[in-house]
Amino acid sequence: MARRDRPRLGLTANFLYADPDRPLFRGKTLQYYEERMSLSMWRGGGLPIPVPELKDPHALELFVEEIDGLVLAGGADVCPRSYGEEPMADQWEGDRQRDDYERALVEHCLRRGVPVLGLCRGIQLLNVALGGSLFQDIGTQRPDALVHRDWYRYDELGHDVRVDPQSWIGRIYGGATQLAVNSIHHQALKQTAEGLTETAWAPDGIIEAVEQIDEDRWVVGVQWHPEWLEAERTAAGGEAEGWADGGKIFEGFVQECRRRRDRA
Ligand code: MN
């Protein structure tokens, strides 16, 4: 790989807010990312660059000028107030500060034509940023749905998704119409934002992937965690044998970022 060939991929932060009872970094806010995410971005051919919350909207705009793609990471719930609802329960309050920071980044990326890949919380944030809404809790609002998160099985829990074979997700998996994926979420898309096309669904109808792709815009969201579905886990004999190899999503995203960067 030629020097400086790796597209620069921004990775959004998780926040651990200041806590006076925490012994380490007492009273300090931490911005962090999960290890497999940065590994998957690197192994897919990208240069992972954490995007800090810089407490300055203009700084985020300048930051976006330095990157060729943005990955919206999983993590905390989206705050229902971000899509015009009150939380149905205190524990579904989500992280409004993170919502605001990520929404600003998405807006700057869309304005500059920087591709955006949203994973788990990321597909939800994308949908909200573009005007859609969410189920605050699948189990409460869609009681007939499958269990999409199990704290005991965590990333061992999964289900099949039906895929539109013409979609980006379908095409990177060779025109697949069905994939086995992990499932670690209790929120999901309710009203899909105008402009987004649904491209994958769980057997209960829960939306598992969306996209909007044209010459000026590239956004894809998936409800699962491809960063935890590496080839060695999904190959024959792996513990997640038969599940979709998550690496393909990162490789495909990096190619798209490179193509759009070099075209500019
Ligand atoms: Mn699911």
Image: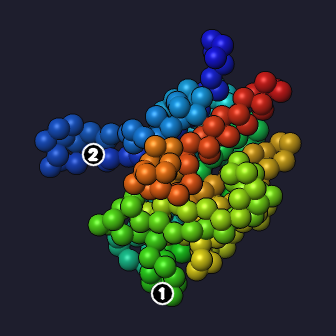
User: Which one is nearer the viewer's eye here, 169 or 141?
Assistant: 169
State the mark number for residue 134.
none
Q: What residue did someone put label 2 on?
A: 18
Q: What residue did someone put label 1 on?
A: 143
Closer to us: mark 2 or mark 1? 1
In the image, farthest residue toward the front:
237
Direction from residue 255 to residue 157 in the image, left or right: left
| Residue 62, x across and y down, in percent | 63, 28
Q: Quadrant of residue 161?
A: bottom right
Mark before the other along the chain sequence, 2 or 1: 2
> Please, what secondary structure does the residue beneath circle 1 have?
loop
Question: Relative to 217, is 47 above or below?
Answer: above
Q: Residues within 10 Å of mark 2 (few under 14, many from 20)?
A: few
Disc 2 residue type (three-letter): Ala
In the image, farthest residue toward the top:
3
Question: Is residue 124 at all visible to an observer of this figure?
Answer: no
Screen quadrant of the C terminus? top right
Direction from residue 65 to residue 262 in the image, left or right: right
User: Which one is nearer the viewer's eye here, 130 or 174?
Assistant: 174
> Please, what secondary structure does the residue beneath circle 2 have?
loop
Q: Residues within 10 Å of mark 1 (few under 14, many from 20)?
A: few
Q: Residue at x 62, y 43 (%)?
A: 248
Q: Quadrant of residue 212?
A: bottom right
In the image, farthest residue toward the bottom:
144
| Residue 50, x across and y down, in percent | 48, 33
- Tell me whether the residue at label 2 lies in contact with that at label 1, contact meaning CB atoms closer than 8 angstroms: no
Q: Is mark 2 within 8 Å of ligand 1?
A: no
In the image, farthest residue toward the right:
215
Q: Residue at x 17, y 38 (%)?
A: 24
Q: Residue at x 60, y 29 (%)?
A: 45
Give the CA distance from mark 2 to mark 1: 36 Å
